[in-house]
Image: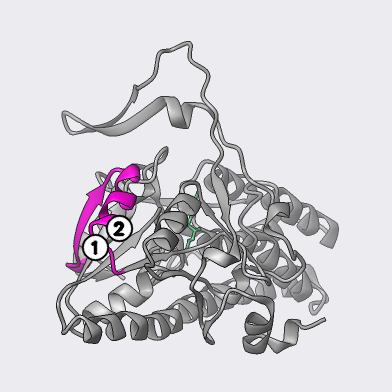
Amino acid sequence: MKVKGKHFRTIWLKKGEEETVQIIDQRNLPHEFVIEDLKNVKETAKAIKEMHVRGAPLIGATVGFGIYLASLSAESNKEIEEAGEKLISTRPTAIDLGWAVKKQLEEIKKGNSLEEKRELLKKNAQKIADESAEQCRKIGENGAEIIKKISEEKNRKTVNILTHCNAGWLACVDFGTATAPIYKAFDDGIDLHVWVDETRPRNQGARLTAWELLEHGVKHSVIADNAGGHLMQKGLVDLCLVGTDRTTFTGDVANKIGTYLKALAAKDNEIPFYVALPSSTFDWNLRDGKEIPIEERGAEEVKFIQGLLKGKVKKVLLTPEKSIAVNYAFDVTPARLVTGLITERGICKAEEKSVLKLFPEFKK
Ligand code: MRU
């Protein structure tokens, strides 16, 4: 997508220096646009854990590149495999990490010398990123049909969409998952407006989704996390559209903390609640969403808040210094609250039969 008119992805090999991977360091957005160099697996793991990069598809792609970087100094397959384990352990809920490691480890089996393996891993990391971007583009095409239908039903009056966290292009390689249909419908001339949940504690909505939408010229309003239910009761939300970090093949959806409450409110107000995801975000082994590991992050993310002060990005203490804070990063929305799943292969119901009809290769 474009930043000040220039096309960017969220991750790429440095031009003319392909032993370095470059990312957009998202920690200081929207106030500072910083590009960071990653040169080894340690820096890559840190970038994922400390959320320089975040969002399930992007961390998957970053892991792909991280394994390539690990191979540059590795002397054996075992060292590369260990790098994979280290990368997987950085963020437990998002399943795309494990998916990317698996894809890369399959690749090293094809090469003989370490030199050959490095070349294969570089090409495959790029392929993972390219395919991920293409999946999101297709999610955009499929999901835009839902928005267009609502627009027709409303006689082309503004379609109001509520989204949570950042499931935008910054969370992916390009286009986004939940935002891809929004960008596609907007580019096709549909009148729409997005309610952007601020998404405490890290405020990915207020900082990242708002920035993306602004850059693309999409009308939006940032709202406090607790405002969604009220807006739904007032008839001001036509559609909820969110991403996910892991979705069981039975349709239970893990996503940023607070998603479940929005789904409950949407159900109570008979508002469609769609989840957009590439196939890499399905967990083909888990039947019950209750078994999805929920990442717990540091209390300081809840206790402090970050913003711009006199031109500089600063963190300030929000709570009493001695208060204990707890920080569950994700929750699980049961399939019964989900209207449908928007994937690169089409839209399906959040239920086993419908999911496996789209992805028959995962039938057991
Ligand atoms: O903790 P984060 O910022 O990595 O969480 C991201 C989300 O929860 C997104 O909504 C999800 O990954 C979908 S991203 C396309």
Q: Are marks 2 and 1 in contact (CB under 8 Å)?
A: yes
SS of the residue under disc 1: loop
Would residue 364 be seen by someone viewing this image from the given angle? yes
Q: Marks 2/1: CA distance? A: 5 Å
Q: Is residue 138 above or below residue 327?
A: below
Give 185 or 90, whichever is nearer the viewer.
Answer: 185
Q: Residues within 10 Å of mark 2 (few under 14, many from 20)?
A: many
Q: Is residue 150 above or below residue 90?
A: below
The amino acid sitting under disc 2 is Met
Residue under pointer 2: 232
SS of the residue under disc 2: helix
Q: Residues within 10 Å of mark 1 (few under 14, many from 20)?
A: few
Task: Identify the residue at image location x=62%, y=43%.
Answer: 295
Give 176 or 276, whichever is nearer the viewer.
Answer: 276
Residue 31's x, y, as percent?
Answer: 24, 44
Q: Magenta segment range? A: 216-238
Give 161 or 18, whichever is nearer the viewer.
Answer: 161
